[in-house]
Amino acid sequence: MTARTAVTLSHLDALEAESVHIFREVAAQFERPGMLFSGGKDSVVMFHLARKAFWPAPMPFPLMHVDTGHNFDEVIEYRDRVVEETGVQLLVSYVQDDIDAGRVVEETGVGTSRNRLQTAALLRGIQENRFDAVFGGARRDEEKARAKERVFSFRDAFGAWDPRAQRPELWKLYNGNHRKGEHIRVFPLSNWTELDIWQYIEREDIDLPPIYYAHQREVIERDGMLLAKTRFLETLPGEEARTELVRFRTVGDATCTGCVESDAADNAAVVAEVAGTRVTERGATRADDRISEAGMEDRKKEGYF
């Protein structure tokens, strides 16, 4: 009898296999899934994994971007290039459409952002496209409210999340049952960390928007964060722009996403930098998470990711 050789997966291989399993489970259980795609590093990795899960067949669901209109130009250029190169279907739900229709009211002035207004555009996009499952790139290590999430996160007919009404996921068994009008948010990257993401990007040589790497940029310091000086950012009296060598750890609205001083110009350098940090990317650079101690959880209960 021939002895069997034990095969041990690396931690990245194990994470990849888990994510691929989740994608295939959703394809088997749901009729109309969709994937959120912002051009940020987590959604890019999620897209890469989804294509692997179904290769050589095309990915069996479209991408959807909730567009606030206050994006970094480099990210939108990247998003459009990816769509053109891969031929994937992209659906865009614009926050501006909800503002114009009077469904939401935009706050104006210094320190405001459209980030919270994304919820209405997200829920409208899910309803208009009749999605019964929606993939998101959130990870549990990002923020304490996201740490409470299941991989399959049940949402009611209003898109709301109740952390006390979620289903057990023993032995990686996922329950996608839902009534008409309800849907499931699915998080294939739940068990990944920021370091895992960057190690995987390095291993797979995944292309990202250039703002994730060190570059010269005009910034304004506010509340301990460096905000990019863009056409969307209103400044306070006394605030002066200066040029610094920076990169972004996460990508969101240009009005509330900060950057960090860094000379990490390639994937290997970013991996080394992330390995030494002790603050999550959202904790370090997202002003929208500083609204209150429970800011993210409150938004999630309203329907946000």
Image (cartoon, rainbow, N blue to C red):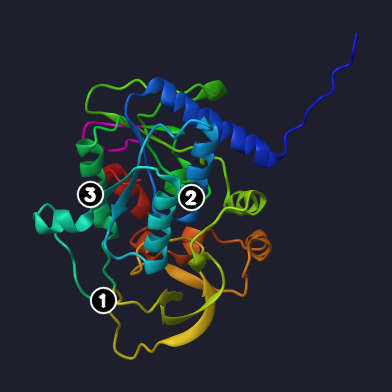
Element assignment for label 1? loop
Q: Position of residue 218 (x, y in %)?
A: 43, 82
Q: Which mark is residue 298?
A: none
The residue tagged 3 is 121
Question: Mark 3 or 1 closer to N-term?
Answer: 1
Q: Residue at x 61, y 61 (%)?
A: 278
Q: Position of residue 55 (x, y in %)?
A: 53, 33
The residue tagged 2 is 44
Looking at the rendered structure, the kind of residue marked 1 is Val
Front-lying residue, 133 or 88: 88
Q: Which mark is residue 110?
A: 1
Q: Residue at x 81, y 25 (%)?
A: 6
- Residue lying furthest left: 102
- Residue lying furthest top: 1
Q: Which residues are magenta?
A: 154-162
Q: Nearer the viewer, mark 3 or mark 1?
A: 3
Q: Is residue 125 magenta?
A: no
Give the overall secondary structure of the magenta segment.
loop
**Alpha carbon separation for disc pair 3 and 2:** 21 Å
